[in-house]
Amino acid sequence: MSNVTIDVAGVRVQALERGHLLALPALLSDVRGQIVVGHHNLHSIYLFHRDPAMRAFYETARLVHIDGMPLVWMGKVAGYPVGRQHRHTSLDWIVPFLRQCAEHRRSVFFVGSKPGVAERAVEAFRADVPDLVAHTHHGYFDDSVDSAESAELIRLINASGADVLLVGMGMPRQERWVAQNAHRINTKLIWTLGAFMDYFAGEISTPPRWMGALGLEWLGRLLAEPKRLGSRYLVEPWSVLAHFAAGMVRTERSAAAARSATDEALVAQLAQYTRTP
């Protein structure tokens, strides 16, 4: 099980394998402190260089995994030993992860999407994981600092006794909210995942899984939502490539990436819990 941290385009990301992700539910009883997990793709890197709230989130995340083949390709160009096995999008691993949660009796709180979507997503998950203990709340609330709605949501999360919090409110909103409130939330694990509930609830068509393996999942999503995702997939990558090229010329790690809280010791601990997916 690899334990490689790479610096590309001014960000730091860990080359985690699927076994690392699936081991998290088992690890929660033995790990110290809260684990905040994030991911990087081209869109997140674009936002990272423009939004202080995104940088604040990644400074608190103990694990940051690769979500997008372009980061694997950039890592290879930069000389890192990374491959397809290090790229993980939630559509591919969320059901096995929830199965591990059920096996280890970890309850999960889902936050995000429009009212009713999280509930439908949980119904879909329970078709594969009937013993899943889940709580839900939509993502249409006032997420500003010290808002009453945000405080009430946090109260509900803590009152539920959930072990895992999965936040699907889109970038950078979900990262901003987690960075501001993680210290108020009692779950052992907090993970930002984007629009995963919309896909499983049938709100958005799911790209064929072979597209992800070939690094073409972006194309499937663009075809499904051209107005919303046009700029993300056709304009933003050029800015990220500029950061990547600049980093290759400078060769040294960026100060922003160096402030990342990625936890190599935690990755090593996860390796002791890994199992074959």
Image (tube, rainbow, N blue to C red):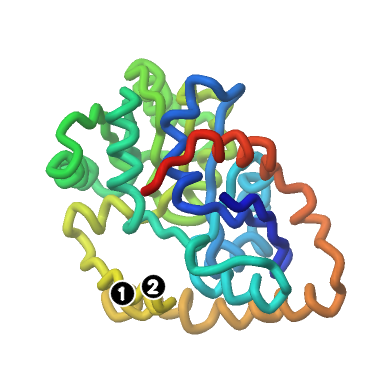
Q: Relative to 32, is 60 above or below?
A: below
Instruction: Name the residue located 60 percent from the left edge and 68 percent from the top edge.
Output: 46
Side (left or right) of 73 relative to 198: right
Q: Position of residue 21 (x, y in %)?
A: 46, 45
Question: Which residue is pictured at 24% across the width and 43% down the height?
Answer: 118
Q: Is residue 130 left or right of residue 195?
A: left
- From the viewer's perspective, is residue 86 above or below residue 119? below
| Displayed quadrant of residue 22 | top left
Is there any visible trace of residue 62 in the rendered image?
Answer: no
Residue carrying label 1 = 210
Kind of residue indicated by mark 1: Trp
Q: How many marks?
A: 2
Disc 2/disc 1 C-alpha distance (Å): 5 Å
Where residue 249 sits: x, y (%)? 84, 79
Q: Which residue is mark 2?
A: 213
- Do the residues under discs 2 and 1 have CB atoms within 8 angstroms? yes
- Secondary element at tag 2: helix
Residue 23: quadrant of the picture: top left
Q: Position of residue 19 (x, y in %)?
A: 46, 47
Say what amino acid the circle numbered 2 marks: Ala
Residue sitting nearer the eye, 152 or 251: 251
Dot 1 lies on which element?
helix
| Mark 2 crowdedness (10 Å alpha carbons): few <14, some 14-19, many ≥20 | some
